Amino acid sequence: MMGILRAERTLLMGILNVTPDSFSDGGRFYDADAAWEQARRMIDEGADILDIGGESTRPGATAVSEEEELRRVLPMVERAAREWKVSISVDTCKPAVAAACLERGAKIINDVTGFRDSEMVEVARRHGAACIVMHMRGTPATMQSLTEYVDVVAEVKEFLAERVATLGAAGIEEIAIDPGLGFAKTAVHNFQLLRRLPELAALGVPVLIGPSRKRFLGTLADMEPMENRRDGTVAAITAAVLGGARIIRAHDVVEARRAIAVAEAVLRA
Ligand code: HH2
């Protein structure tokens, strides 16, 4: 069955961080006009989904209040839903923020904490939202000290399978899963997850991968500082699609679109 998170082609989710402190673009789109222009640009460039976030989840980021997060994202969600056909996702782990955005036209909740808060599940159910379930441990403040795994792929898969079952039982109809590159993972873990992505894809739920500009790429030659991670991001996207990812979350839409096109052509050949 096709839907907002499941299509014949790989879907591209463009990232809009309305924050002062996101790891790669903090402050650039904090201003409402700059955010709007960036959203328009990503849509013109071919984004299928706009992922609007008002709280950075970078390692060590400080949490923001509900009021502040709403002040950042709600006007953008409302205006985008009114003026554009693009699907709107809200990157939040707060049920009240998710509810307000769904009431203003967002259709997808992207919760990096994996809907472990039952109130979040209830909000999604009530609004008929599609859910992106990501694996992480701890909080952005603590996650990089929680990187002990026996088999990272098996453990992430087990977590995601349990979440899919729980959300399905709660009546959530559309779900995508995400191993959460960079969230409580070492660089090697991220590469193992990419290498063994078919194991996650075997769960039969669309897999989302978000490698864009992340620090694990910077562990490889010539990918520091962050500005040097664009080409590496393209390569990681290619690997993800070849491994079975069906949704790619990225900052640079044109480059991501091209990488997806190459990987899809390889898969079709
Ligand atoms: N990565 C980030 C934020 N949200 N959501 C999903 N589903 N998957 C991801 O990999 C993911 C995510 C971190 O990237 P970014 O939004 O660019 O930075 P920040 O959290 O600092 O705003």
Image (spheres, rainbow, N blue to C red):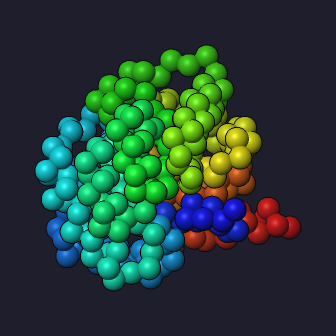
- Asked whether, in this view, residue 165 is left or right of residue 217, the answer is right
Q: How many marks?
A: 0
Query: Looking at this view, is 127 or 57 the one in front?
Result: 127
**Spot occupied by residue 76 in the image (x, y as percentages of width and height):** 26, 69
Residue 77 position in % (x across, y down): 29, 67
Q: Nearer the viewer, residue 100 or 8?
A: 100
- Report the front residue among 122 and 265: 122
**Front residue (pair 166, 93):** 166
Point 61% across, 16% down: residue:
150
- The quadrant of the image that shows the N terminus is bottom right
User: Relative to 5, does residue 39 appear above or below in the rendering?
Assistant: below
Residue under the image location 33 percent in, 30 percent down: 139
Can residue 40 be seen here? The reply is yes
Is residue 66 positioned above or below 186 on the image? Answer: below
Quadrant where the image shows the C terminus: bottom right
User: Is residue 170 depicted above or below 100 in this figure?
Assistant: above
Q: Give the image location of residue 120, x and y in percent.
A: 37, 42
